[in-house]
Image (cartoon, rainbow, N blue to C red):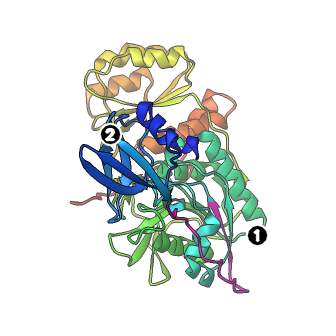
Amino acid sequence: MGEDSLHDYRGGLRKALIDVGADIGDHMRVESRGRVYEGTLMPRLESEDDRHIVLKLRNGYNIGVYFDEGTRIERLGQAEKPEFRPPPLPETQEGLPRVSIISTGGTIASRVDYTTGGVHAAISSRDLLSIVPELSDHAIVDADILYSVFSENIESDHWSGMARKAEEKIQEGAQGVVITHGTDTMGYSSAALSFALRSLPVPVIFVGSQRSSDRPSSDAATNLVGVVTAAATAPFAEVVLGMHETTSDTSIVFHRGTKVRKCHTSARYAFQSVNSSPLARLVDGEIEMIAEDYRRRGEGALEVMDGFEEKVALLKFHPGLRPELIDVLVDDGYRGVILEGTGLGHVSEGLNESIRRAIEEDVILYMTSQCIWGRVDMDVYTTGRELQMIGVEPLGDMLPETAFVKLKWALGNSEDIDGARELMRRNIAGEYTDRTLYTGEFG
């Protein structure tokens, strides 16, 4: 009996299961309210009630059987428990470029738990090689697990770790680096490494998937083959994010790490370049460059600048936003705030005094827009001009998420506030464009 596996069952139901020696995965018979059910005992969500026992029936469906004092529970035996067994690794081919895959977790490095139906960060990047043997046709691949977390748990110290691991692999001779990452915050991480890895000699490509790698509808294999091919052969040497261009498997598109946003919760084409075109795409195994201006492979010596200031906030303006929120940040010692304002870069006049106080206490404030496309222009309306007079600086067409990451990086790699301001004004990794493209569905 494994009591720990029953930790999400509570109260009298938990006791009844323990009394009959039940464990998750055991074959059970439950008699409740005049009906008899047989099936495999399943785990439960920790937030569910203590009145239902969850069984997987022979037809594959899960049901919740009501439990009360009259319910009879019987353990029939130990059921066969599903287990994931990846196939062996493919043989490597001599003479191919060497590509390093660094795994940080996320759906692309996850599998379905067929006992519970949930998704768990459980597959290593080496497992991915065995599941996608086509990778060995394009590169000699080595794989390392750096982290095994979902992307909502990624923080700035993880960004530093990714940058240092990428540097290590490049110094060891990798001709391209692939970082597997959860999609939800992959745009933040791609921006962070765009700033942290200076003078890249090879591509560093982030990749994720919208469905775990062992689902029939998974995009993981196509994405992986595409980005490994690009890491090995593409002419560019920048930090990019590679994912499906459309719902089909015909092309993988590569977005600059500072100009990309996840725009759909679940579609394969979730990632879109914002205010610029993508850098390149891969079609039929061949790289097609879209941008004309890009960093070429093999130029320069890598420099790592992986400092990130923790006390930076991204504050989205909304009607009724209270100035006390800015005051709290100042009182807590925050060094910078990115404002995500409306339209051309506005917030309500009621925030002006708190903004003024923040700037007087050496907190840097910058303005971005909540709009997906376009750029801020704080010279058009009085509101924007007043904010500039107070000391808020506009950030052109930089994405709010990228601005947040860049300010953390600028403060983390500067000796003083003036140095951080100078870095923020420079176009470090394509985060600014001189002329914003009219892009999007109707562009």
Q: Which residue is mark 2?
A: 370
Gap in Å between the C-alphas at discs 1 and 2? 42 Å
Task: Answer whether residue 283 is visible to the viewer in this image.
Answer: yes
Q: Position of residue 392 (x, y in %)?
A: 43, 27
Q: Residues within 10 Å of mark 1 (few under 14, many from 20)?
A: few
**86 within the magenta span:** yes
Look at the numbered discs 1 and 2 and tell me whether their residues touch, using CB distance below 8 Å.
no
Residue located 29% across and 25% down the image: 383
Which amino acid lies under the numbered mark 2 shown in the image of this protein? Gln
Q: Position of residue 81 (x, y in %)?
A: 52, 62
Residue located 71% across and 52% down the image: 164
Q: Position of residue 210 (x, y in %)?
A: 41, 60
Q: Residues within 10 Å of mark 2 (few under 14, many from 20)?
A: many
The numbered mark, 1 or 2, whose residue comes first in the sequence reads: 1
Q: Which mark is residue 26?
A: none
What is the magenta range? 79-102
**143 within the magenta span:** no
* In the foreground, 185 or 319: 185
Q: Which residue is mark 1?
A: 173
Residue located 54% across and 56% down the image: 181
Residue located 64% across and 60% down the image: 102
| Secondary structure beneath label 1 | loop
Q: Position of residue 20 (x, y in %)?
A: 50, 44
Looking at this view, name the residue that lies furthest to the left: 442
Q: Is residue 287 above or below residue 253?
A: below
| Secondary structure beneath label 2 | loop
Q: Is residue 92 above or below residue 182?
A: below
> Residue 368's image quarter?
top left
Q: Is residue 281 above or below residue 15?
A: below
Q: Main secondary structure of the magenta part?
A: loop
Which amino acid lies under the numbered mark 1 shown in the image of this protein? Gly
* In the foreground, 95 or 38: 38
